[in-house]
Amino acid sequence: MPAERPIPVWSRRYKELNKPMAKEEKAPQRSATRSLFLGYNCHETRRAHYFLFIPYLIDDAKTGKLINVSGNPWNSDFTLEIKTGFDRKTSPVLGPTRSHYIYLGEISADDFVDEEHYNIRNTPNANDRIESIAASIPLPYRAPGATPEHPDDPMWLRPHPRLERCQEWTNRLVQSLVDAGLLGASALMKMSSAHKAHLCDECAASRAEALKL
């Protein structure tokens, strides 16, 4: 029986027989947990503004969901505010001041809903447990008939006896997340040691440098 002739390397059959096997497509990996941060903005004569930030699994954790209460004791009541698709690198949280972030711990990805498009709303997504718990936290307390002091009064550098603000609310939210088993208890110690008032060392140094120009 005559030997079979070799298949020319330039032929279609040779290319079909030696075509690389297609790689099996894999579903994109999803993280089982998501990082949660305390964010704050410094102020020279008042306490820092607190908020929570949960980054998405895209663009190097630059974009994510911001949860806080907005308002102030002087001319507006506080309200729950949720910002989705929030870019922490380019969007100021409170005026022109710089935002700082402290890692609090991990939450389950099952308790969080990604919403990449930018939006601001005051009602929670019922499928997001973090938002639902935030909506259950009473807004900052205001004693009946309480009159706030001037914004630059030193009273605002410490907890006010008649007017709560974002720090009290954010602390209650983190405590509730821990109590519900959604966040590790170490977050409470990190909250207690977080910057409270005046400019932090980094902001103070930046301001001093700017004043030299």
Image (cartoon, rainbow, N blue to C red):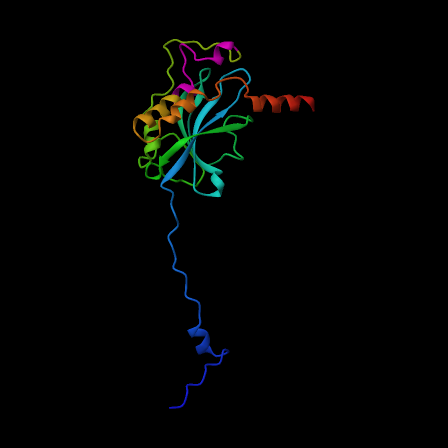
Q: Is residue 155 magenta?
A: yes
Relative vertical location of residue 204 with respect to residue 89 in this rendering, above or below = above
Instruction: Inspect this view and state whether residue 85 appears.
Output: no
**Farthest left residue in view:** 180
Q: Quadrant of residue 162?
A: top left
Q: Give the residues in magenta.
A: 153-169
On whether residue 182 falls in the magenta region, the answer is no
| Residue occupying the point 35% across, 32% down | 130
The spot of residue 32 in percent (x, y) is 35, 41
Pinpoint residue 23: horizontal percent, then vertical percent: 41, 61
Q: Where's residue 177, x and y in %?
A: 34, 28
Q: Residue at x 55, y 20 (%)?
A: 199
Observer-nearest of 30 and 210: 30
Quarter that holds the C terminus: top right
**29 shown above or below 122:** below
Is residue 67 shown to the viewer in this render?
yes
Q: In the picture shown, does residue 105 fall above or below 188?
A: below
In the picture, measured across the screen, residue 187 lies left or right of residue 9, that is left
Q: Residue at x 38, y 59 (%)?
A: 24
Residue 58 versus residue 120 in the image, above or below: below
Q: Residue furthest right?
A: 213
Image quarter hosting the N terminus: bottom left
